[in-house]
Image (cartoon, helix red, strand yellow):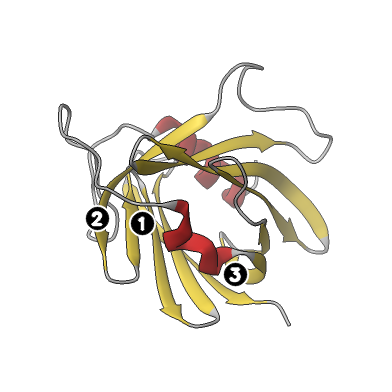
Amino acid sequence: MQPALVAVIALVLLAGAPAAAQHTRTATPGTTPPAASLADLAWLEGEWTGEGFDSVLHENYSRAVGGQMPGHFYAAKDGRPTFYEFVMLAQVGNSIEYRVRHFNPDMTAWEDKDRFIRFPLVAVEKDVWYFDGLTIRRTGPDSSDHIVRVKRKDGSEEDAVLHYRRAK
């Protein structure tokens, strides 16, 4: 199994695991998610490219509609896709949640047909949105880092930093 695939599978399994590194945070049971709006993340709209998981990454976000900002992602290595994600940022009450479904290159889903991975928002700082196990950090007008908590085969955990820049 390819290292990028292992890392993403681990991310799926760690959606509720305790934080192990300094760049991601974990939700505290019983706490209210911070107030946020999809308008706060409108800067994500458009096409992004980057690197991470020893792959070239491509991510696109559409304009929010009906309380949802849809997007899609794929990772490629040696010119071949390794996996895809359908992404949705969703307005949930007065906060937001990052949602993901994963697919193999042949479009078979990783999650059951009625399931997806949820990353509720747990904190917001200037230009940083902390979701439970996933952080989006705006590093410039056309750049960002997405930091995901991953668990390796040996059981160790770390934050993987995915560097993005807006595609021209």
Q: Quadrant of residue 139?
A: bottom left
Residue 25, given in percent of the width and then of the height, sits at 25, 49
The amino acid type found where label 3 is placed reads Glu
| Front position in the image: 150 or 115 | 115
Whether residues under marks 1 and 2 lie with C-beta atoms below 8 angstroms apart, the answer is yes
Whether residues under marks 1 and 3 lie with C-beta atoms below 8 angstroms apart, the answer is no
- The residue lying at 48 percent from left, 72 percent from top is 144
- The residue lying at 36 percent from left, 56 percent from top is 159
- Mark 1, Cα crowd under 10 Å, few <14 / some 14-19 / many 20+, is many
Which residue in the structure is indicated by mark 1?
Answer: 159
Which residue in the structure is indicated by mark 3?
Answer: 51
Q: Is residue 102 above or below residue 59?
A: above
Q: Is residue 160 above or below residue 138?
A: above
- Badge 1 marks a residue whose secondary structure is strand
Residue 36, given in percent of the width and then of the height, sits at 34, 51
| Front position in the image: 91 or 121 | 91
Which residue in the structure is indicated by mark 2?
Answer: 21
- Please tell me which of labels 1 and 2 falls first in the chain: 2
- Please tell me which of labels 2 and 3 falls first in the chain: 2
The amino acid type found where label 2 is placed reads Ala
- The residue lying at 64 percent from left, 36 percent from top is 102
- Badge 3 marks a residue whose secondary structure is strand
